[in-house]
Amino acid sequence: MDEASFHGKNHFVLYPNEENEAIFRRVVETGEPFSIIAKPFQFPDLPEWGVTYWDWTLYPIKDDQEVVEWLIFVLRDVTENKRAELALLQAKEQAEAANRVKGEFLASMSHEIRTPMNVVLGMSDVLLETDLDAEQRRLVQTMHRSGKALMRVISDVLDFSRIESGRFTLSAHPFSPRQVVEEIAVFMRMAAEEKGLTLPVDVDPGIPEAVLGDSGRVCQVLINLLGNAIKFTQQGQVSMRLTPHFQEPGTLLFSVADTGIGIATEHMDHIFRHFTQADSGITRRYGGTGLGLAISQKLVELMGGQIWVESQLGQGSIFFFTLPLRPVEASEPLENPVEQRTETPTRSLRILIAEDSPDNQLLFQIYLKNTSHHVVIVNDGVEAVARVREEPFDLVLTDIEMPNMDGYTATRAIRQWEQEEGRPPLVIVALTAHATSGKREESLAAGCDGHLTKPIKKQTFLDAIQRVAESTDKQDFLDVLRNVSIDTNN
Ligand code: ADP
């Protein structure tokens, strides 16, 4: 700007206005300097300059009596910098707006796909309950599986786009982080054990009993990480730890480690980007969309934490994330992290479960937690027979291999007692670990009414129980079981 235009002239004389006069008076009265950074100004006599920006300071110079005698007015033209900064800001806002539009488009598109897809899945489910020959069944099952895979992709896209478009809210309620970790382990252990992997869990005793946060989202991140760990590990173990984060007091440190394929150093920072996988061969070999980690990262960051990975190719990986979750008094009832849906059966059943594995006991407890069924869990066949003699049950679910007395022996003992006492036969269902037809025959021969193949999916399990609760006769229930067994086998 042209210095000559100002030379020897007083700004306040040149451009008198109320604001300037107020500042002038204030500096004279207080004796304190006054500054404004990048003050916008439009010269009335130079409209072609447009809005200009000035770093603007008024210094008082005082006499011996501390009275302001002079004012030094320093102006610095910062128009260029400010205009560049504004242009940058505008570009950023435009980019963010475009991103929001993209996110909203993805969100509504995924939603639109989900609705008809639900119908496709529901219909194929119904079709599977009809009489199909082996080939037809295989085709419908394949269709059902692909439909479910598509639904998972769509949920991921939906989550991701919701986060991107800023339409994502976190809830805050008291929950037990230990419970979250332990219950997720029970669920994920089924998938791990199917691949011959173990899934040990370690929760530090120093972890607060209850914290305030969004347990559902914490679960989602852990499930993503455990799902990946299981997917990318062929042998060894996947483990989960929860400890206080010693570098940052008040912060929890979660980690999921595996002994799987590992990640090359050069791929480590881009696997968190959306739709990105470590290398192009991954989709072919393992499937996936490359969205899981991007979503996990966004969720962790929204919750105020950080996520990172340490890995060695061929050795395994450890994913870490921190969450600053404030401890709270555990006086309020804690939110059940894994299952928040309430089932409302037609009638409450009295169910006896004979199962020696503490993990499976916990699993059944979680499955049945929000239902109105009355559940008794015993550890072996001896206890099961004793309980059946003591109190009435509508349904007995019995594991086959148990210490002291196995499930078949217990079933035979119960059947014999029923005959001797002239009682109507209880519905007894064997829980078998193997989906072979031999096991089914064996169960029936021992006097069971049917069998469920482990791992038993929650919905399958609850559906079967719901149908038992609704069924009026035993034949109806046996039909249910036939379909349940088919579903759990695939
Ligand atoms: P997806 O699993 O659907 O491909 P993710 O975002 O969850 O997407 O993971 C991105 C990529 O990061 C994966 O494709 C894989 O290359 C790599 N990755 C994630 N977890 C592991 C792991 N535990 N071991 C090895 N590689 C992993």
Image (cartoon, rainbow, N blue to C red):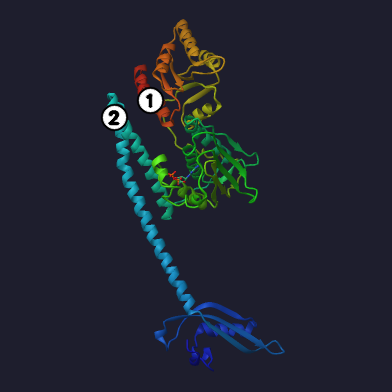
Q: Which mark is residue 207?
A: none
**Which residue is depicted at the point 60% across and 46% down?**
252
- Give the crowd class for mark 2: few <14, some 14-19, many >=20 residues within 10 Å: some
- 86 relative position to 316: left or right: left
Q: Amino acid at mark 1?
A: Val
Tell me the residue that label 2 is attached to: 127
Where residue 68 appears, as percent x and y from the top left, is: 65, 88
Q: Which mark is residue 484?
A: 1
Q: Are marks 1 and 2 in contact (CB under 8 Å)?
A: no
The image quarter containing residue 57 is bottom right
**Which residue is depicted at the point 63% across and 85% down?**
60
Instruction: Looking at the picture, tell me which residue is in the foreground, 483 or 276.
Output: 276
Quarter of the picture containing the C terminus is top left
- 147 relative position to 172: left or right: left
**Which residue is depicted at the point 43% across and 71% down?**
87
Instruction: Looking at the picture, tell me which residue is in the foreground, 370 or 153.
Output: 153
Number of numbered callouts drawn = 2
In the image, residue 431 sits, relative to residue 275, either above or below, namely: above
Find the distance from the CA under tag 1 to the CA under tag 2.
14 Å
Where residue 107 appears, as percent x and y from the top left, is: 36, 50
Where residue 187 appears, as percent x and y from the top left, is: 49, 33
The image quarter containing residue 139 is top left
Label 1's element? helix
